[in-house]
Image (cartoon, rainbow, N blue to C red):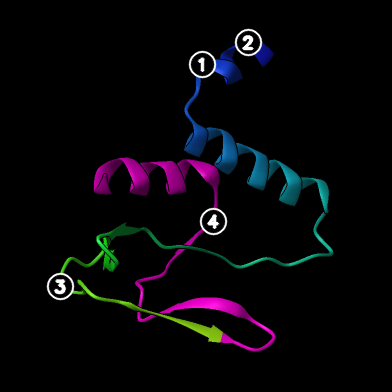
Amino acid sequence: METENYKKGLLPRVVDELFEAISLCGEATAYKIKLSMVEIYMERVRDLLDLSKDNIQIEEHEGHGMLLCGATEILISDGEEALKLLSVRS
């Protein structure tokens, strides 16, 4: 199994690790995972889940850090769902 993981790309490995870490926390902890996908090209941020949003603004908010205001967010419940969305949209 460890050898198979090396054959995976970066995104599948990150998604696997994220949901593995969540599963280790047990049921006492609740999580809400949201997926966004953007492209930054020539200083423009484009929402790849909604192509009509082609110049999303990056804003800094105290206590929250950098935010992409208006980027589409899709709630996901497991790694398979995340990878399916990423593969369909890319």
Secondary structure of residue under mark 2: helix
Secondary structure of residue under mark 4: loop
Q: Provide the residue designation for mark 4.
A: 77
Q: Position of residue 56 (x, y in %)?
A: 30, 77
Counting residues from the start of the chain, the first of labels 2 and 3 encountered is 2
Q: Provide the residue designation for mark 1.
A: 7
The answer to which of 69 and 74 lies nearer the viewer is: 69
Measured in 3D between alpha carbons, the distance from the residue under mark 1 to the one under mark 4, in whole angstroms, is 24 Å
Measured in 3D between alpha carbons, the distance from the residue under mark 4 to the one under mark 2, in whole angstroms, is 26 Å
Counting residues from the start of the chain, the first of labels 1 and 4 encountered is 1
Secondary structure of residue under mark 3: loop
Q: Is residue 15 above or below residue 8?
A: below
Give me the disc on residue 52: 3
Q: Provide the residue designation for mark 2.
A: 3
* Direction from residue 33 to residue 28 in the image, left or right: right
Q: Position of residue 9 (x, y in %)?
A: 47, 28
Q: Which residues are magenta?
A: 61-90
Q: Could you tell me if the residues under marks 1 and 2 are in contact, i.e. CB atoms within 8 Å?
A: yes
Measured in 3D between alpha carbons, the distance from the residue under mark 1 to the one under mark 2, in whole angstroms, is 7 Å
